[in-house]
Amino acid sequence: MIVTLTANPALDRTIALDSALVPGEVHRASSAQEDAAGKGVNVARVLHGSAVETLAVLPLAADDPFAALLDPTLAIRAVPTTAHARANIALTDAAGETTKINLAGTPLGDDVLRALVDAVVAASDGADWLALCGSLPAGAPGDLYATVIHAVRARVAHPPRIAVDATGPALETVLAQADEIGAVDLIKPNEDELVQLAVDLSAPDVDRPALHSRLVREVEADPIAATARLARELVPGTVRAALVTLGGDGAILVDAHGVWHAGIPAGVDVLSTVGAGDSSLAGYLLADRAGAAPAERLRTAVRYGSATAALPGTRLATPADLPTGDIPVRALD
Ligand SMILES: O=P(O)(O)OC[C@@]1(O)O[C@H](CO)[C@@H](O)[C@@H]1O
């Protein structure tokens, strides 16, 4: 069983253009779609589509149109709230570019936040993994995920391994509090998020804008080596493993035993990158649950991420969508 938490779910509205997106111009949409989404919901949707037992925990109002868009066969634990999920916009153009506009989301009351933590604790006992995914709702304490991790590890008899896919304070506090709450088992940043994390965790006397510019230049020059270097600074002391997604450059996996890089399969036409990172995380988790070795976990992550990138809107990969082409994986020094 894999439990996911989506503290800030999103009704994803995707508008497909058959021309290039030009700021300031009028465009005609070639199609539009809506999906009940948000990072943890997406991870659960992919797992469910691959017949892996999963439970998605999220705040959900009874009258929210989001509910009607959810697959009724997806197991969810809905924490009652009056706040509707935000509507996030994605514009996808003919060149395969995705432009995303994410809203902050309606604030949740302290009672709802407490109920979310309790729901995750109740769902987690005996689970293989708990994945804490996405941004926090507006006004929520920045250390909400650290609070969840502490509660799960303190109150659950058989706590699951924990993956975090988040940015900013939600992620930084989890890592900064590793001494008190323990190291998390997996983080899944992309290259920009990993750079930002390195900056956020740097010593107070560091010139942060200068560090940020230098790291961005290093990642642009050699994404694989530079992100491997940054991830190695965190693994295995602060986090046990890092799956870093690199878009067209594939992904790397760093754990206590090594570093691996996977390229992307040939012949994938990118339609919408929305949900590709969530699908990579789901692929990694389902391969891990099946007992796969690190290289195969990484390969499965890239296979799921690439498959989702070839689908429109926030449609997510199922086994039938997976590319069959070779995904080369090599160990890095
Ligand atoms: O604002 P967040 O929570 O960071 O991201 C939300 C979001 O962009 O993540 C998913 C794709 O990963 C989408 O379904 C959703 O709109």
Image (spheres, rainbow, N blue to C red):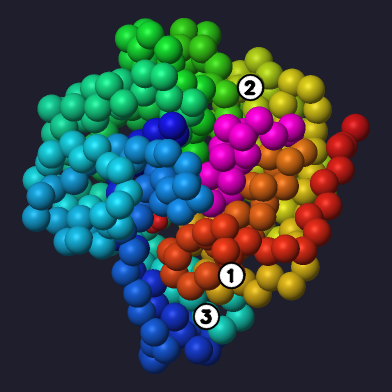
Residue at the spot of label 1? 310
Residue occupying the point 47% across, 42% down:
52
- Dot 1 or dot 2: first in sequence order is 2
Q: Is residue 183 above or below residue 25?
A: above
Task: Give the quadrant of residue 206.
Answer: top right
Residues 51 and 169: in front is: 51
- CA gap between label 3 and label 2 equals 38 Å
Q: Is residue 128 left or right of residue 155?
A: right
Residue at the spot of label 3? 93
Residue occupying the point 43% across, 16% down:
159
Query: Whole-percent x and y of residue 216?
Result: 69, 48
Residue 226 appearing in the image: no
* Circle 2: element type: loop
Q: Is residue 72 above or below residue 99?
A: above
Q: Residues within 10 Å of mark 3 (few under 14, many from 20)?
A: many
- For the record, the magenta segment spans 278-294
Give the number of the disc on residue 240.
2
Q: Is residue 229 left or right of residue 55?
A: right
Task: Give the quadrant of residue 296.
Answer: top right
